[in-house]
Every structure is written in structure tokens, then in C-alpha cells.
Image: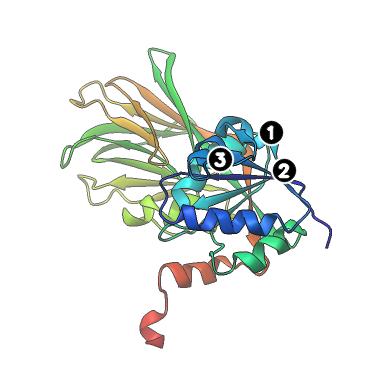
Amino acid sequence: MAAAFRKIGLMGHPEQRGIDEVLPQLLDLLSQHDVEVVLEQELGSVLEGTSLPLVAADAIGDAVDLAIVVGGDGNLLRAARTLAASGTPVIGVNRGRLGFLTDVTPDDMAQQIPEVLAGEFDPEARFLLNAVVRRGGEVVGSGDALNDVVVASGATAQMIELELYVDDTFVYRLRADGLIVSTPTGSTAYSLSGGGPIMHPKLNAVLLVPMYPHALSSRPIVVDGDSEIRIDILERSSRSPPVICDGQVHMTAEPGDSVHISKKPHKLVLLHPKGHNFYASCRDKLRWSSALTA
């Protein structure tokens, strides 16, 4: 079969468990196909003495036409923030734990990766969020998220006071440990632990989940995905809440600051092996129906 992709970029974290085993296997597999391979710069330490070109993470999207991420969902989240702008599709080989995004296992790699290279895959577009912290009208920080943006108190059992606006319409004043703003992709991640619902990844929606709210009537809300969300940190708040994107990009807001969250124009193109099914993935990862089949 002719290759649908000619230049492949391999991405991952050098300290990821098992990457020193999977990466050589993946390279051997790719060597059997008519493709060029480049490595994310950090992976040079895993393959010492390699003659393969090393490319910085923020440039790899423009250098290849397919990225393969080896690791867990955290590795793919990191890659997503750099690959979305270039439109470079990505597929994940799971060496993490749960792996809702990295759905190729090392055992299935020898069959599924060649199929993807030949154009046999199911593509899926996932939108990202952009978060901007403003202070006195000036931007003091920004970040992107595929899963979620979290405005938190930054301390255990310490509440902050927030005001939430959607499209400049006041929603409520919230006293809580924080607020999770999640994409459908992130609905199976942190917001799920916070009591939020699971959303199908094709939905154009954003989920707002209060974290341990003072009022028990403060419940998760699903809003339109194109909404402009603003979270105001009230002046009387005693804490400077961190603003965290995908658990990886950290900013700090001060009382009186506002956090503006909206959909990014570029989407991540995520590739799945043929036959991928979101509900089957939920059954597997979340062990749905396990009590009935035990």
C-alpha cells in the first residue's frame, strides 16, 4: 500500500515509562515503509548516537505531515498545543495509564501504525481553549488547553470568590475552591473527578464545573462552545489563584484580575485506528458494565 504520510515526527518525554522499549520498536516498524522520520529534540537522549534529525517541539508540526506521540495523555496534551496551529495530524501510542487520547497499544502497533500510514484511519477534530489573564486591561499571561482551564484557590480547603460571565451576561457569584472550564475532550479528565458529565467529543460545548462550592445548588453547566467566558477574581478575595491549562501551563491571577476563555481558531486533528468507538473506549477505560460481566 502507498503511504499517505511521507514524513513522520516522533514525540514524547524521555522519562516516560517504557519509552526506551517502544521507541526502537516503532523506528524499526517505520523503517519498513517509505517514510522519513524525525525525532523531537528531547528524545535524542533516549536514542543516543542516532543519525535521525532532531527537531524542537515547537517546530516539529511544520516539519512533518504526521506526528506519533509515545506516552500517556499528558504527552499528547503537550504535543496538541504545538501541533494544532500547523494542522499536523497526530496519533498516540499509549505508554501511560488511562489513555483516552493515546489509543494505540504497543501490542497493536505493528498492525495499526502501517494501516494509518496507508490512509486507513478515522480522523477527529478536537477544539482547544485559549485562556488570557488580564490585569487593569493589560494581558499578563496566556495559555492553551485541549482538556481544561482551571482557576483554583491554590490551597487546600481555601475558597476564593469568583464572578462568572458568559458572553458578557452575568451567570453567578461563586464561593468555591475554584472553577473548571472543560472541553468535551477534557470531560473524561479532571472535570469528571469534580462531578461533571461526560460529553461526546464531537459536541460544540464547554463545561463549567465548580470545585467544592460553598452552595450545594452550584452545579455543572454546559454552554455553547463558541461562548466567550469571563471569570472575575473579586477584589476581596484573599488569595492569588493559579490559572492552569491542562495541568501543565501555570499562570497566577491576582484579586481584581479577569480570566478570559474562548475557543481557539485552530483544531487538533486526532487520528484513530479504523473502527474506533468513543463508547467502547469509555467501557474499556471506565470499566462500564464490568459488574455485569464479572
Residue named by callout 1: 62
Q: At numbered mark 1, what does the secondary structure look like: helix, strand or loop?
A: helix
Q: Residues within 10 Å of mark 2 (few under 14, many from 20)?
A: some
How far, Cα to Cα, is label 2 from label 1?
8 Å
Q: Quadrant of the N terminus?
A: bottom right
The image quadrant that residue 249 belongs to is top left
The image quadrant that residue 234 belongs to is top left
Q: Position of residue 6 (x, y in %)?
A: 77, 47
Three-letter amino acid code at the position of disc 1: Asp
Residue named by callout 2: 65
| Disc assigned to residue 263 | none
Q: Residue drawn 47% across and 72% down? A: 283
Q: Quadrant of the C terminus?
A: bottom left
Q: Residue drawn 37% across and 56% down? A: 192
Q: Position of residue 264 (x, y in %)?
A: 58, 34
Callout 2–callout 3 Cβ contact below 8 Å: no
- Nearer the observer: mark 3 or 1; the answer is 3
Residue 128 showing in the rendered view: no
Residue named by callout 3: 49
In this picture, residue 264 sits left or right of residue 62: left
Residue 50 showing in the rendered view: yes
The image quadrant that residue 84 belongs to is top right
